[in-house]
Image: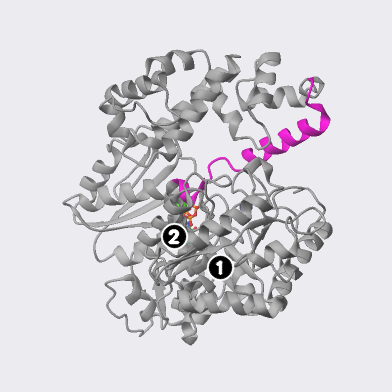
């Protein structure tokens, strides 16, 4: 996952991610300068090594003890030492003086890699999206060798897509910012209560701005504190109860400071959604009550009693409702369900017992089988499925038959070293080929504990063809689950055209599970479909799609999306304990063989 702004103003200390990002950016600029490919590769490898090294790399760099780490040569080690000990790197600062910062925007356009960027830069001095758009629209770019109308059209699509998403942020990109701000607000002596509100609290996959609410007797003091915090790049609005600022990363944050008595109402109002608020208010009115962001009061002439409200839950009870989890507040039936006592008991992170879609160094992951197994155990999971890429995903170093068989062997051997309370399952993330057939034959698929089937190429197929392609995989008796159903990359790549409802029905019929991919770039299948899937009888499997140990924690985002999709623990198969999961997988294999 990319961070919002590496080395952004807020953080005093360098992190390993900052190191990796600096090295990667050096490689990009060297490439644009036409430097020696070996040198460029050394920086790329360095970035990779920094990310995958298991020790405390930042401290080692500060103490100048990086020698001997694989992938980090002497020159890079010295530069990282300089960066860690002084907060600066002269080489990097000199290098970037030659380019505007806008050049890095180019790398965020889908389908535009370093080679193409270099060609455009050399030919037309393209160093920003604005300039890129000009040369694409003028027809100049299409005349370059290796470009042509088709790839220029694709670049223009990428630009349009990005433009339509300016000012939108992925949940995963803001999560750590929110905790940092919240922690700081809560630590202030004048704060009695503080929470994040808005779309973030509702767990929306993307957000436009961040909202915070604080209960305090000294609102001005809190607002002053917020407006002058080290992370503030710009103060946008400053009032008696409200302050809006922009962070160095570019995202806006709104803070409301209210009295303790107003707090539950303010928190509820600013959590939204707007549609949920409107529905709540009209329910209140029907009961002779008026609800706003400060209070619940009887409407004029009404005899309605107003119960005490100390917390949000008292507010829902006052309206004759069960408490509605923030994740459900989208006015898609939650108020009716709360009135009937029909709200689902939503799945929680602690309910998960294992997970299936994970990569290792065998394909494009960064950690070994052993390391991934250990990390899963540390998280308290009872089982971990390994599903590396299959051979057609050569760009991801997909495994061929021989390597997959060797991995199955390695997994079986490693399993013998675990106590009875942990197990690895041997799987594969098998490519669904263009015609809907699978990348491995049935005999090999039969040797696996489970199969994740995913689309990784030919994204442009028309909807009918794409749907037929995926349906064929769903019907395949060896397929246990569908990976990232629509292939979307939030704010970067649209989902491919596919009839989701048809796929859901086929999965219900065949007992194929659908993945909720928890990588914050994907969150796929989208939460808006899960209630329907559940009603049709489809089981969800929450997978992190982890490419390194730390990414197992993506599960947290997946659970949030599952909650938005009204899912309970019984709807999520990986809530099953190890013993039952073993039986379930065995029974599935038997039933469909
Ligand atoms: P976003 O766009 O990702 O920031 O989404 P929200 O939901 O965080 O929207 P935001 O920040 O504009 O407002 C926060 C909450 O304040 C929103 O969820 C509901 C409440 N709110 C804002 N404007 C209105 C309004 O005009 N009517 C009502 N009833 N509620 C509003
Ligand atoms: Ca917001
Ligand atoms: Ca807002
Ligand atoms: Zn995949």
The secondary structure making up most of the magenta span is helix
Taking the image as shown, residue 461 lies to the left or right of residue 185, namely right
Left/right of residue 565 with respect to residue 445 in the rendered view = left
Q: How far apart are marks 2 and 1 (CA)?
A: 13 Å
Above or below, 310 relative to 150: below
| Residue drawn at x 54%, y 21% as measured from the top left | 40
Percent from the top left, x then y, of residue 566?
A: 53, 73
Q: What element carries label 1?
A: strand
Residue 565: x and y, percent? 55, 69
**Boundaries of the magenta span:** 144-173
Name which of mark 2 and mark 1 comes first in the sequence. Answer: 1
Residue 541 sits inside the magenta stretch: no
Q: Position of residue 91 (x, y in %)?
A: 42, 15
Image quarter where the C terminus lies is: bottom right
Q: Mark 1 points at which residue?
A: 541
**Residue 531 falls in image quadrant:** bottom right
Residue at the disc numbered 2: 556
Name the image quarter holding residue 61: top left
> Is residue 276 visible from the viewing direction of this image?
no
Toward the viewer: 122 or 437?
A: 437
């Amino acid at each position: 996952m990319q961070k919002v702004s590496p080395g952004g103003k807020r953080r005093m200390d360098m992190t390993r991610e900052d190191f990796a990002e600096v090295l990667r950016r050096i490689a990009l600029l060297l490439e644009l300068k036409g430097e020696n490919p070996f040198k460029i590769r050394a920086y790329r490898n360095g970035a990779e090594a920094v990310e995958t090294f298991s020790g405390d790399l930042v401290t080692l760099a500060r103490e100048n003890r990086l020698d001997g780490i694989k992938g980090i040569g002497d020159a890079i080690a010295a530069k990282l030492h300089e960066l860690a000990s002084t907060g600066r790197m002269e080489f990097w600062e000199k290098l970037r003086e030659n380019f505007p910062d806008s050049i890095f925007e180019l790398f965020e356009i889908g389908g535009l890699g370093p080679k193409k960027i270099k060609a455009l830069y050399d030919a037309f001095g393209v160093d920003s999206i604005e300039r890129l758009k000009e040369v694409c629209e003028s027809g100049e770019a299409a005349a370059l060798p290796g470009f042509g109308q088709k790839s220029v059209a694709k670049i223009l699509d990428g630009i349009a897509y990005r433009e339509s998403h300016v000012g939108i942020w992925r949940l995963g990109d803001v999560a750590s910012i929110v905790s940092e701000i919240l922690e700081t607000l809560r630590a202030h002596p004048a704060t009695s209560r503080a929470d994040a509100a808005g779309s973030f609290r509702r767990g929306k996959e993307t957000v436009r701005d961040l909202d915070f609410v604080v209960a305090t007797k000294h609102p001005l003091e809190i607002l002053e504190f917020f407006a002058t915090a080290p992370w503030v790049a710009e103060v946008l609005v400053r009032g008696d109860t409200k302050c809006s600022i922009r962070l160095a990363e570019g995202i806006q944050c709104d803070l409301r400071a209210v009295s303790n008595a107003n707090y539950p109402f303010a928190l509820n109002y600013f959590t939204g959604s707007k549609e949920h608020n409107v529905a709540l208010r009209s329910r209140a009115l029907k009961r002779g009550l008026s609800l706003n962001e400060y209070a619940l009061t009887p409407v004029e002439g009404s005899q309605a009693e107003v119960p005490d409200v100390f917390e949000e839950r008292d507010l829902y009870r006052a309206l004759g409702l069960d408490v509605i989890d923030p994740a459900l507040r989208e006015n898609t039936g939650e108020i009716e369900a709360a009135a009937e006592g029909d709200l689902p008991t939503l799945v929680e992170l602690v309910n998960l017992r294992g997970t299936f879609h994970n990569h290792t160094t065998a394909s494009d992951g960064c950690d070994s089988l052993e390391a991934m197994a250990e990390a899963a155990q540390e998280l308290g999971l009872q089982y971990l499925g390994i599903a590396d890429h299959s051979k057609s995903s050569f760009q991801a170093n997909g495994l061929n038959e021989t390597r997959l068989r060797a991995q199955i062997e390695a997994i079986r051997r490693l399993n013998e070293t675990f106590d009875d309370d942990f197990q690895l399952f041997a799987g594969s993330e098998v490519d669904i080929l263009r015609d809907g057939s699978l990348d491995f034959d049935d005999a090999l698929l039969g040797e696996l504990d489970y199969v994740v089937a995913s689309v990784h190429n030919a994204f442009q197929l028309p909807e009918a063809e794409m749907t037929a392609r995926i349906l064929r995989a769903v019907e395949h008796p060896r397929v246990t689950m569908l990976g990232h159903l629509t292939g979307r990359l939030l704010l970067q790549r649209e989902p491919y055209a596919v009839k989701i409802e048809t796929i859901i029905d086929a999965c219900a019929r065949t007992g194929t599970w659908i993945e909720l991919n928890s990588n914050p770039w994907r969150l796929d299948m989208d939460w808006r479909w899960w209630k329907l899937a559940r009603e049709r009888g489809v089981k969800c499997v929450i997978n992190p799609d982890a490419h390194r140990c730390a990414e197992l924690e993506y599960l947290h985002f997946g659970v949030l999306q599952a909650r938005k999709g009204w899912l309970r623990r019984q709807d999520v198969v990986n809530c099953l304990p190890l013993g039952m999961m073993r039986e379930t997988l065995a029974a599935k294999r038997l039933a469909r063989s």
